[in-house]
Image: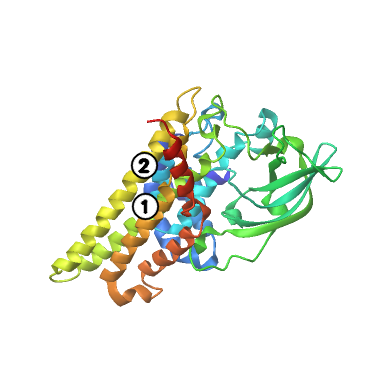
Amino acid sequence: MTMTETALAELAELREPTDAAAILANVEAILPLLAEEAEDCSAVGHLTDRAHRALLAAGVYRAGFPARHGGPEMSLTDQTRMVEMVATVDGGVSWNVAILAATGFYASRLGEDAYAELYPHMDLPTAGSFHPRGRADRVAGGYQVSGTWRFGSGIHSAHYVLGGAAVFENDEAVLKDDGSQLILGVWMSTDEVEILDDWHVVGLAASGSSGYQTSGYFVPESHAFDRYFEPDPHADPLNKIVDLPFYSMAGIAIGLSQHAVDIARDALRAKPAPGERELALLGEAESLVRAIRAVVYEGVRRIDEAIFTPGELPGPSVMARGDAPIATDLARRAVDLCSELVGSRLIFQAFPMERIVRDLVGLAAHASTWRSRWIDVGRTVLEEER
């Protein structure tokens, strides 16, 4: 019995996760369970076994597997919706969803034989980090890999872990045709790397973003891919561009802000007669959430439109987006308004708004939400033909 079958025995009401509709329905069904586990996930600093088994059974980790391997090949729109749904329960748990759902993106970069070897089935979640870079020395049949990587989100629930490594041969850097050094993503068994006890943070604790390290780990040549491969219009839709796995993370800001609005709404409902000022604060927060949702989903819709068209790539104006930074900025505004509505209860750890505030701090620290992302947007706007 596979791990998924074991999990399905406990969660018998779930559908077989063969397509996007089934996976989204399953995620909705397990939200109460994830809500029950949220506090424990935050306390231990990674997914609890119960939360992990529920996500596994729901099919979350299968999301990015290509159709040619029997995967659901979920659109970025549906993946973002999946992340948003879980973020309405807990930001750190949703971070695991966004990261481990990328397993299939990476798996489809393998050759057929290596894919069959590493992924005999789709329920082998894969974590990873590409910074700081490790070192891969060419040896007979593959690479000798050493390094220490930070922010290995989801590693405590992962079967494999990827590491970014700069390639050397005879102590000389291996260069690509464009003169840049070859940087690989290499597969390693999570059981065979050392997971570091370095994840003690203010927010997104449940993401389990621990560092990891190894020394002299042998990686066969077929278990590696060019981390910075050129866009390929003929690749699997979710693998046409190297950065596609990270776009669903914008759903976290939507879910966190929606969760805050839900808490504030319930707090006002408990009052005998909310004042006009309180109603205005709630209305403004709700409008901000709608604005975030509109910006994010319009962005991923445009990317989906291009990548799911055979032989087509998204243009620069589609990919150079500032959606994650603006989503996070607006989410912080929405949560500030909701925090004002709930008052002093905000500071108590037993009150759920407190964790939302902390998780937003963690979200804003991630590179995908940095305002520097807008430089590329501005450059594209300036150069784009009208």
Q: Is residue 52 left or right of residue 126?
A: left
Residue at horizontal 31%, vertical 68%? Answer: 339
Residue at horizontal 39%, vertical 52%? Answer: 326
Q: What label does residue 42 carry, if any?
A: none
Q: Secondary structure at mark 1?
A: helix
Q: How is the image coloured?
A: rainbow
The quadrant where residue 277 appears: bottom left
Total marks shown come to 2
Residue 90, percent from left and from top: 42, 59
Residue 286 seen in the current view:
yes
Query: Where is the C terminus found, in terms of image quarters?
Result: top left
Q: Which residue is mark 2?
A: 297
Q: Which residue is mark 1?
A: 254
Residue at horizontal 29%, vertical 65%? Answer: 338
Residue at horizontal 60%, vertical 39%? Answer: 106
* Contact, mark 2 vs mark 1 (Cβ under 8 Å): no
